[in-house]
Image (cartoon, rainbow, N blue to C red):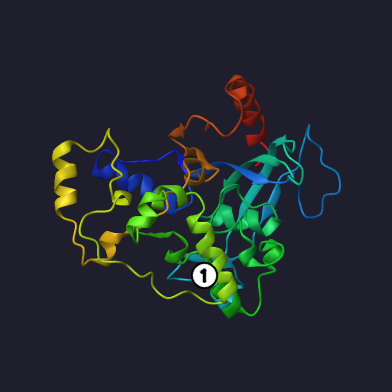
Amino acid sequence: MTSGLVLIGKNYDTAMNISSQISDREVSKFYLAEVEGQFKGPNETHINEASPAAVIVDQPLGRLNAKMGLNAVMPESEGGKPSKTSFVPLLYKKPQTEGDSGRTLVLCRLYTGRTHQVRIHLQYLGFPIVNDPLYNSYDWGETKGAFANYREPRSELLAALAASRDRTAYLKTAVQSEDSQQSGGFDGEQKDDSARVVDEEKEAGSSPPPAKVSRLSAPPAALRYYPDDMTDANTKARLEAAYDPECPDCNRRFADPKMSNLVLHLHAYRYAAADWSYTAPLPDWACAPDDMRDLETLIQTRLTLL
């Protein structure tokens, strides 16, 4: 999920005015992204950290697959629409582990507003956004889709993207027997269950059949996971009363992602028009709390380069 600024008009006239300004491209939109690697332009051999040059990407973007909601760099002759984003690096974070390429905070300015524009243009440059489940993946090819070198043929690319997003990769079946319950069952397998499903799919070369669901006489322990601060006793009772041993969905549980994986490292930082400007606080992943003020100062300096 993208963090940061959200504009909401508190009355009809204000909402329509802001909407018109955005449609007429009268609003300057700035985002902060954290990308993999040490960011630089495609033609740069030396990085001037003190005074970097802006990198402009004007590759047209079009719909790759409507069902999955994916866009990609696409010629205008094939349905791509003109798109333009400029980038300037802010701060490079050195690698923390072996094999890590480090990360770079990048300031972005959108001149157009295509779906997933910043994410795709950064992917195009070879610096996908950290924690981007759609565009930071080898499903796109050996270079993760850098410079639109996508996996070919197109049908193979779509198949790879669909497979990694198939629900069976996240599905957890209910406890199948008393033996599995006694041995830890669902709880003991929770951490590696989804990974095993993915591995089995790869070995089989195709999607597995739907998970078999046993007929249980009572709600399995795996289903009794309710946040204490969100569910009272009456609600819990109603949920368990609604359990149907003949219902396949009642016997399924999906893997809960880590909280860190729910945050896309893309942050709407500032929207500004001729008569108004709004700026959101920096996200926690940008830098250490003690360095936030210095980063804000650096951003104000680099904004003039975009």
User: Residue 1, position in %: x, y?
Assistant: 46, 47
Q: Quadrant of the C terminus?
A: top right
User: Taking the image as drawn, is residue 161 in sight?
Assistant: no
Q: Tell which residue pokes out farthest to the right in this image.
A: 45
Task: Tell me: residue 253, above or below residue 282.
Answer: below
User: Residue 101, position in %: x, y?
Assistant: 74, 45
Task: Tell me: residue 234, above or below residue 212.
Answer: above
Instruction: Tell me if 48 is positioned left or right of 282 in this view.
Output: right
The residue shown at (67%, 34%) is 302
Residue carrying label 1: 163
Q: Tell which residue pokes out farthest to the top in this image.
A: 290
Task: Tell me: residue 294, above or below residue 154.
Answer: above
Instruction: Tell me if 215 is positioned left or right of 22 in this view.
Output: left
The residue shown at (16%, 55%) is 242
Query: Does dot 1 land on a helix, a strand or a loop?
Result: helix
Q: Residue 170, located in which quarter of the rendered image?
A: bottom left
Q: Nearer the viewer, residue 63 or 214?
A: 214
For disc 1, the neighbor class at 10 Å (few under 14, some 14 to 19, many from 20) is: some
User: Residue 240, position in %: x, y?
Assistant: 18, 50
Instruction: Tell me if 96 is positioned left or right of 250 in this view.
Output: right
The residue shown at (26%, 60%) is 250
Task: Tell me: residue 141, above or below residue 269.
Answer: below
Q: Nearer the viewer, residue 163 or 171?
A: 171
User: Taking the image as drawn, is residue 64 in sight?
Assistant: yes
* Residue type indicated by callout 1: Ala
User: Residue 252, position in %: x, y?
Assistant: 33, 60
Q: Residue 139, located in which quarter of the rendered image?
A: bottom right
